[in-house]
Image: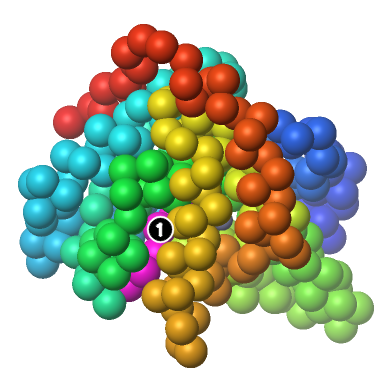
Amino acid sequence: MKIAPILIFLLLTAGCATSPTGRSQLMLISPEQAISSSRQAYIQTLQPLEQQGLVDADPAMTKRVKDITGRIIAQAIELYPDAKEWDWQIKVIDDPEMVNAWAMAGGKMAVYSGLIEQLRPTDDELAQVLAHEIGHAVANHTAERMSVALASQLGVLGLGLAVDSDYRGYALTGGALAATVAIGLPNSRTSEAEADQIGIELAARAGYNPYAAVTLWEKMAEVGGSSPVEFLSTHPSPGNRQKTLQRLAPHYMDEYEAPGERPRYAFAE
Ligand SMILES: [Zn+2]
């Protein structure tokens, strides 16, 4: 198959979707395709670390992360029914230097021990990190970012067509693309704002104080100091992040203060 038919096919079938906050999203790659690629990418990313004993190495830290994440996922499933079908996972990667966390499509997530050890977040603050990542997942940001990456690759390929060259060898596809956009490349400020908004609500519904979203980002900036932490480079700050979160927080106090035990998602072993 030559490039031209692929390009034409993709342009003809180019989809748009609407994000949970009502924003229009480019979807050349469907959420289902992104989920399938991410399943593969997640295994490939974690396997070498697992072999070195660097995944879920600290049982107490792992339990804390899973307890908090499980409560937020239970709320995500309530609000975003598609997410009910996902095989959600969260792993703690042992790397004391790395202050970071990420989410691939379909709720495949990881947080680095460095984020917990260096930031020393309260449960409410850690919940905000995890809920922010879950926000990226339920808003299908991996599929959207794969689509944007693909569209720009097709732009390059389109130029290649003029000289009748085969540029396919340079195109990142499937799992490699899913991993690159989810772990390595910065999110857009728009998707950051969206993940913040979704995250603060999910965390509040799971019983975590919405004002912790404000103090979390303050701590993140403090720990960063002169050398920005990895989390801030892959999660760039949308303008007025703290102000926006400060403004959003009081709107979710009822959810936060609602009485009763919060349900928890049970992770597959
Ligand atoms: Zn983010």
What residue is drawn where x is 70% and y is 55%? Answer: 243
Ligand 1 in which quarter: bottom right
Left of 92 or right of it: where is 24?
right
Color scheme of the displayed model: rainbow
**Magenta includes 83?**
no
Quadrant housing residue 4: bottom right
Mark 1 crowdedness (10 Å alpha carbons): few <14, some 14-19, many ≥20: many
Left of 250 or right of it: where is 268?
left
Give the residue at the far bottom of this rendering.
226
Where is residue 211 drawn, in percent x and y? 52, 44
What residue is drawn where x is 86% and y is 77%? Answer: 159
Left of 260 or right of it: where is 62?
left
**Magenta includes 101?**
yes
Is 15 located above or below residue 102 in the figure?
above
Where is residue 210 drawn, in percent x and y? 52, 38
Quadrant that contains the N terminus: bottom right
Is 180 located above or below residue 60 in the figure?
below
For the question of whether residue 148 can be seen, the reply is yes
Quadrant housing residue 267: top left
**Residue labelled with disc 1:** 101
Dot 1 amino acid type = Ala
Q: Secondary structure at mark 1?
A: strand
Q: Nearer the viewer, residue 53 or 116?
A: 116
Span shown in magenta: 98-103
